[in-house]
Amino acid sequence: MFSCKNEPSINDVISCTSDVDFHHSKIIRDAKNNFEINLGKHWKRELYFDDYQSRIYAADTTRNFSSSFIIDVTRFKGKIIIEEAFKNKITTQVLATTKTYIIQNSIIKFNDQPAYAIYYFHKNEEQVTYNIQYYIADQEHYYLLSAQINGSQNFTKNNCEILQIFNSLKIIP
């Protein structure tokens, strides 16, 4: 029996209700040549690696703080099994911080690989910070794509840009 239903994806966790053209972009490859991702051409970027991880950390430093976001894409050595127990562990860790609230979370797929995404916010006296964590299992490694949105100015546009960046991840065999 066949089903027309698509597997759940990151698009089901992050809401993007507008057409945002993420232009002036450049494909950036991590220092160990394990993955690449499409980021802003003029963004500030840092690449880091050691024996256990390879990371790309980036932000558009031309924006003011309340309309900015930070992207962190890391490939870790080690295996994770994405299932309900993993989801519960991450959810518990996130909610351990006071004044933190989950917007959406789900076990999903990334290119037929099991994945888990959680979207939440933390509120303090001065501001609200939104966070997205996207875990992707991949054989003997796993990926964590995370974004921190600093405030609610340009919130919809930021969500859509983050979604486009996350969807641009290409794992290099």
Image (cartoon, helix red, strand yellow):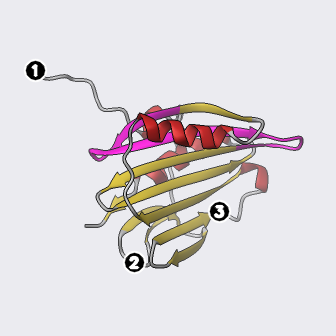
106 magenta-colored = yes
Q: Determine whether, in the image, residue 32 is placed left or right of residue 98.
A: left
* Amino acid bearing label 3: Asp
Q: Determine whether, in the image, residue 113 is placed left or right of residue 145.
A: left
Q: Quadrant of residue 36?
A: bottom left
Task: From the image, tell me which residue sits under label 2.
Answer: 32
Task: From the image, tell me which residue sits under label 3.
Answer: 60
Mark 1, residues whose alpha carbon is within 10 Å: few (<14), some, or many (≥20)? few
Mark 2, residues whose alpha carbon is within 10 Å: few (<14), some, or many (≥20)? some
| Residue at the outermost left position | 1
Q: Determine whether, in the image, residue 7 is placed left or right of residue 56.
A: left
Q: Are marks 1 and 2 in contact (CB under 8 Å)?
A: no
Above or below for 55 versus 150: below
**Earlier residue among tags 1 and 2:** 1
**Foreground residue among 81 and 49:** 81
The range drawn in magenta is 105-129
Residue drawn at the location 63% of the way across and 38% of the way down: 120
* Amino acid bearing label 1: Met
Q: Quote the CA–CA distance across marks 1 and 2.
A: 42 Å
Task: From the image, tell me which residue sits under label 1.
Answer: 1
Residue drawn at the location 57% of the way across and 45% of the way down: 132
* Amino acid bearing label 2: Lys
Q: Quote the CA–CA distance across marks 2 and 3.
A: 23 Å
Of labels 1 and 3, the one closer to you: 1
**Foreground residue among 108 and 12:** 108
The percent position of residue 53, horizontal first and vertical second, equals 47, 71
Instruction: Identify the secondary structure beneath mark 1.
Output: loop
Above or below for 173 versus 1: below
The percent position of residue 21, horizontal first and vertical second, equals 50, 48
